Amino acid sequence: MDMTTSKLIETLRACAELLRTGIEAKTGVNPQTAMLMLTAVRACASELEDRWEREGPWPAVLPVRGFCPLIGRRRN
């Protein structure tokens, strides 16, 4: 599956919002785990936005599997 950089950022922001509302609604999600996930998702989205602003857009489509541009190596 491929995703544009802007769509990936949008998706990360949506995930963060879902985590936040789940934490507030006390849906049975472990609050400590959910807060860690929320922090990680927000950090990833912010890093993508910052790098996009500094370096310009990456290629039109980013692979969701394979090379990870944030860490500069292949991931499993």
Image (cartoon, helix red, strand yellow):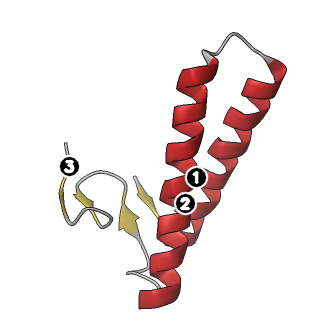
Alpha-carbon distance for marks 2 and 1? Answer: 5 Å
Q: Residues within 10 Å of mark 2 (few under 14, many from 20)?
A: some
Q: CA distance from mark 3 to mark 1?
A: 20 Å
- Residue at x 40%, y 81% (from the top left corner): 58
Q: Where the C terminus falls, by quadrant? A: top left
Identity of the residue furthest to the right in this view: 25
Question: Which amino acid, by three-letter code, is at mark 2?
Answer: Ala
> What x and y, as percent, mark residue 1?
39, 52
Residue under label 3:
75
Q: In the rendered view, would you say 2 is above or below 24?
A: below
Tell me where residue 37 appears, x and y as whole percent.
Answer: 53, 35
Residue 32 percent location from the top left of the image: 57, 22
Answer yes or no: is residue 53 visible. Answer: yes
What amino acid is found at the position of numbered circle 1 in the picture? Arg
Determine whether label 3 and label 1 are within 8 Å by CB. no
Q: Which residue is mark 2?
A: 45
Q: x, y percentage for residue 45?
A: 54, 60
Residue depicted at x 46% and y 88%: 54
**Mark 2 vs 1: CB contact within 8 A:** yes
Local secondary structure at mark 2: helix
Q: Earlier in the sequence, mark 2 or mark 3?
A: 2
Can the viewer see residue 4? no
Residue 73 sits in quarter: bottom left
Q: Secondary structure at mark 3?
A: loop
Disc with the residue nearer the chain's start (3 vs 1): 1
The residue beneath circle 1 is 42
Question: Does the residue at mark 2 contact the one at mark 3 (Cβ under 8 Å)?
Answer: no
Q: What is the crowding at mark 3: few (fewer than 14 residues within 10 Å), some, or many (at least 20)?
A: few
Nearest the viewer among 14 and 32 is 32
Q: Residues within 10 Å of mark 1 (few under 14, many from 20)?
A: some
Viewer-nearest of labels 2 and 3?
A: 2
